[in-house]
Image (cartoon, rainbow, N blue to C red):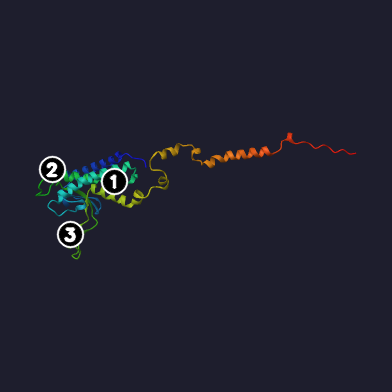
Amino acid sequence: MIQKSPYKYFLLTLFLIALDQGVKLAVHFYMAPGFAGQVKVAGDWLKLHYVLNPGMAFGMQLGHEYGKLLLSIFRLFAMVGIGYYLVSLAHRGAPNGLLWAMAMILAGAVGNVIDSTFYGVFLNNAPYGSPTPWFHGQVIDMIFVDVWEGFIPEWVPVWGGQYYSTPIFNIADSCIFVGVCIILFFQRRFFGEPPIEDSLLPISGPDAVEASVLPASEFLDEDDEQKPMNKETETSSDDSQQPTPESVIPEEPKRLD
């Protein structure tokens, strides 16, 4: 496969990061948190709702004293790993759809890393009692798809008896979700076997190059090369056995007495 440059995919990543951070900062400075600042975008089911998320995507959290710090460190390593994997896929000539999906996932990871790392310092939104504002910033969420909200029945394990609503998320979460869905839906195309015509050709080495420049006569067997010569000799030998007009002696006419 042909190697591809990863730069155009990183441009998509940078664009999505800028979009995510721009929306988050606009929500922080121009919207009131909670239901007081809620804005309806499309009826009652799509709204802008400013909330702070101290945990993972879609409001999930790690219930540990150092859970936030561990999550921030994990996000940093995940960001570096995804970026390296994107470059590796591009150099191996991976399908464009897979590279665009990885660029979206990278943008989502970087967007939430920025929130966790810096928002506790610059926006002063670290949870109360945090040992340090660094790496304890809360992620700003604002997209609220209000499909369902209410109390979960008591018989449901773990979450029973508590009030829940559909998750509130941000653009970075959306990038991760959409990128993962694209990879899952098209995994056969992205990670399937190479085409038949590619698998029949040599992967590397001088033979692949030489095969494209050698003349056709180099691929003929010795028997094939000798066949035209044998045919010529056969025709010449047949011609030599046929009598020529000069070699034919006419018979003498018989005398009648």
Q: Residue at x 61, y 38 (%)?
A: 233
Task: Find residue 102 and name its label.
Answer: 1
Q: How far apart are marks 1 and 3 (CA)?
A: 35 Å
Where disc 3 sits, the SS reads: strand
In this rendered view, identify the residue nearer to me: 173 or 240.
240
Question: 256 left or right of 24?
Answer: right
Q: Where is residue 192 in the image (x, y as percent from the top left)?
A: 36, 50
Q: Which residue is drawn at 54% across and 39% down?
A: 225
Task: Find residue 196 and name its label.
Answer: none
Where disc 2 sits, the SS reads: helix
Discs 2, 1 touching: Cβ within 8 Å:
no
Identify the image quadrant of the N terminus.
top left
Q: How far apart are marks 2 and 3 (CA)?
A: 32 Å
* Labels 1 and 3: the sequence-earlier one: 1
Q: What residue type is labelled 3?
A: Tyr
In this rendered view, identify the residue nearer to me: 105 or 125.
105
Q: Quadrant of residue 147?
A: bottom left
Q: Which of marks 1 and 3 is in front?
A: 1
Which residue in the protein does label 3 denote? 163
Which residue in the protein does label 2 denote? 121
The total of numbered circles placed on residues is: 3
Q: Position of residue 137 (x, y in %)?
A: 15, 46
Q: Distance between the residues labelled 2 and 1?
A: 30 Å
Q: Which of marks 2 and 1 is in front?
A: 1
Q: Where is residue 224 in the image (x, y as percent from the top left)?
A: 54, 42
Q: What residue type is labelled 1?
A: Met
Q: Residue at x 42, y 40 (%)?
A: 207
In this rendered view, identify the residue nearer to me: 30 or 73.
73
In this rendered view, identify the residue nearer to me: 135 or 80.
80
